[in-house]
Image: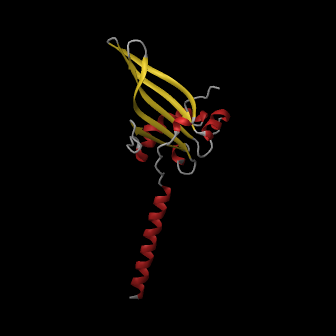
């Protein structure tokens, strides 16, 4: 009987250790970047199209926290760097393009230990103005984001450049 209790104890310990190991190796979710509009504005671009005389498009604003700004300047992004790409609809008013509703925001967070499989960056996309409606999720980050960012390996997987 004592052997059975011992075997149960060993099996229970193995299950607990395996579960803890699996949890620790899973990349954490990327949080919504509260206050990013107060960070350094890196640059903006407008992508437009003209369909039947109606102009449409999107504004693409890039923001960086203090660590990411240093990364833009030195080419080396430290853990804790956060980059946000804010995508806002471009609205045609016949005289000019104005910002409309937010389409989504993309977020990159640097943590070489937590996101080792995606070049040290965690990725997420939040839908419209929501701070919780995730469009990428951990499962899709490698395919949806990192596949494109791999082409920027020489630039620490970052597309944008800082302009002083």
Residue shown at 47%/46% (left/top)? Answer: 31
Residue 5 located left or right of residue 78: left
Percent coordinates x, y for residue 128 in the rendering: 38, 35
Depth order, front residue of 143/39: 39
Question: Can residue 37 be seen by looking at this rendering?
Answer: yes
Residue shown at 59%/37% (left/top)? Answer: 156
Residue shown at 45%/70% (left/top)? Answer: 14
Instruction: Classify 141 as above or below 8.
Output: above
Percent coordinates x, y for residue 25 in the rendering: 49, 56
Residue 116 located left or right of residue 90: right
Depth order, front residue of 65/26: 65
Instruction: Classify 79 as above or below 9.
Output: above
Percent coordinates x, y for residue 69 in the rendering: 62, 36
Work out which quarter of the rendered image holds the C terminus and state it: top right
Furthest toward the left, the residue is: 52
Question: Can residue 157 be seen by looking at this rendering?
Answer: no
């Amino acid at each position: 009987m004592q052997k059975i209790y011992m075997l149960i104890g060993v099996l229970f310990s193995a299950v607990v250790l395996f579960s803890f190991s699996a949890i620790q190796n899973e990349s954490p979710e990327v949080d919504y970047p509260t206050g990013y509009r107060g960070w350094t504005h890196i640059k903006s671009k407008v992508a437009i199209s003209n369909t039947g005389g109606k102009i449409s498009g999107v504004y693409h604003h890039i923001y960086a926290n203090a660590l990411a700004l240093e990364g833009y300047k030195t080419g080396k992004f430290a853990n804790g760097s956060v980059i946000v790409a804010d995508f806002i609809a471009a609205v045609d008013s016949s005289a000019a393009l104005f910002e409309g509703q937010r389409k989504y925001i993309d977020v990159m967070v640097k943590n070489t230990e937590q996101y080792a499989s995606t070049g040290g960056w965690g990725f997420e996309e939040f839908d419209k103005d929501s701070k919780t409606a995730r469009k990428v999720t951990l499962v899709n980050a490698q395919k949806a984001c990192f596949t494109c960012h791999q082409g920027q390996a020489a630039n620490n997987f970052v597309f944008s450049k800082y302009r002083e």
